[in-house]
Amino acid sequence: MKSVAFSVISYQLSVISYQLSVISYQLSVISYQLSVIRFKF
């Protein structure tokens, strides 16, 4: 049972890290768009 619980926990951690990477990617895209807007004006 412990091994099953450990695999579930590691799976949840990998999902969380994936979501964090997606969020950081979106933030970098937003900052890029903001810099483009500043450059235009």
Image (cartoon, rainbow, N blue to C red):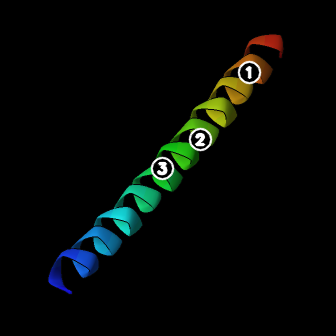
- Residue shown at 27% from the left, 77% from the top: 4
Task: Point out the frontmost of discs 3 and 2.
Answer: 3
* Residue that sits furthest to the left in the current view: 2
Left or right of 12 on screen, residue 24: right
Report the front residue among 33 and 11.
11
The residue that appears at 83% across and 16% down in the rendered structure is: 41
To which quarter of the image does residue 37 belong? Answer: top right
Q: Is residue 20 above or below residue 36?
A: below
Count of numbered circles on the image: 3
- Camera-nearest label, 3 or 1: 3
Mark 3 secondary-structure assignment: helix
Tag 3 residue: 18
Please, which residue is most extreme toward the top here? 40
Q: Which image quarter is the N terminus in?
A: bottom left
Among all residues in the image, which is located at the extreme bottom? 1
Real-space Cα separation, disc 3 to disc 2, in angstroms: 14 Å
Looking at numbered disc 3 in the image, what kind of residue is underneath it?
A: Tyr
Question: Which badge, 1 or 2, comes first in the chain's sequence?
Answer: 2
The residue pinned by badge 1 equals 38
User: Tag 1: residue type?
Assistant: Arg
| Tag of residue 16 | none
Earlier residue among tags 3 and 1: 3
Residue 27 or 2: which is nearer the viewer? 2
Q: Which residue is mark 2?
A: 27
